[in-house]
Image (tube, rainbow, N blue to C red):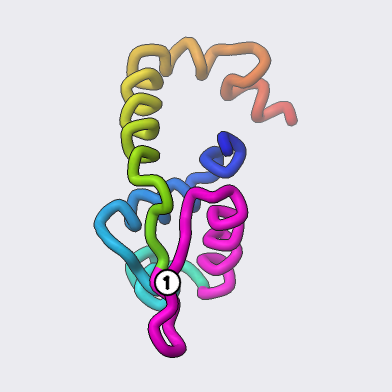
C-alpha cells in the first residue's frame, strides 16, 4: 500500500477523488495528464484496494474505496512537516541517497 502512495501522480489522483468520484476523462482534464497515464495509475490504485469504480452505461466513475485514507494522508503530511528535514538528510532514504541511485 505504501508503495502505491509513494508516487506523486497517484497521490494527486487520490486527493482529487477526495472531492468526489471522477471519470478518467475528468481526471485527464483536471490533472493535465495523458489518458493512458491516468488509467495506469488508477489500475494500480484499484489493485491495491484504494480506489474502486462504478459503471454507468459505458462510463466508469472512480472513487476512494476507503475514505479513511484521507486521515492517513493528513497524518503523514503532519509527520513529514515535523520530520521533513530529518527525512531529507537520511543517508538511506534522503535526497542525497536518491540522487546516487
Name the residue at 58% across, 72% down. 36
Magenta stretch bounds? 35-61
Q: Which residue is most to the left?
A: 19
Left of 31 or right of it: where is 33?
right
Q: Which residue is most to the right?
A: 101
Question: In terms of secondary structure, where does tag 1 sit?
Answer: strand
**Is 39 a magenta residue?**
yes
Residue where numbered disc 1 is placed: 54
**Is 31 a magenta residue?**
no
Left of 43 or right of it: where is 14?
left
**Residue 25 x %, y %:** 41, 77
Out of 1 and 83, give the one closest to the viewer: 1
Out of 94 and 60, give the one closest to the viewer: 60
Name the residue at 54% across, 53% down. 45
Total marks shown come to 1
Q: Residues within 10 Å of mark 1 (few under 14, many from 20)?
A: few
Q: Quadrant of the C terminus?
A: top right
**Residue 17 x %, y %:** 34, 57
67 up-or-down from 33: above or below: above
Left of 49 or right of it: where is 11?
left
**Residue 41 x %, y %:** 56, 59
Q: Quadrant of the N terminus?
A: top right
**Residue 37 x %, y %:** 56, 66
Name the residue at 32% across, 65% down. 21
Residue 85: quadrant of the picture: top left
Amino acid at each position: 500500500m505504501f508503495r502505491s502512495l509513494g508516487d506523486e501522480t497517484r497521490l494527486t489522483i487520490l486527493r482529487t477523488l477526495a472531492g468526489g468520484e471522477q471519470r478518467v476523462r475528468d481526471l485527464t482534464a483536471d490533472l493535465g495528464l495523458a489518458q493512458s497515464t491516468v488509467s495506469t495509475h488508477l489500475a494500480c490504485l484499484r489493485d491495491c484496494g484504494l480506489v474502486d469504480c462504478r459503471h454507468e452505461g459505458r462510463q466508469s466513475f472512480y472513487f476512494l474505496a476507503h475514505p479513511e485514507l484521507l486521515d492517513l494522508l493528513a497524518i503523514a503530511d503532519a509527520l513529514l512537516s515535523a520530520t521533513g528535514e530529518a527525512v531529507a538528510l537520511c543517508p538511506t532514504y534522503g535526497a542525497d541517497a536518491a540522487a546516487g541511485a
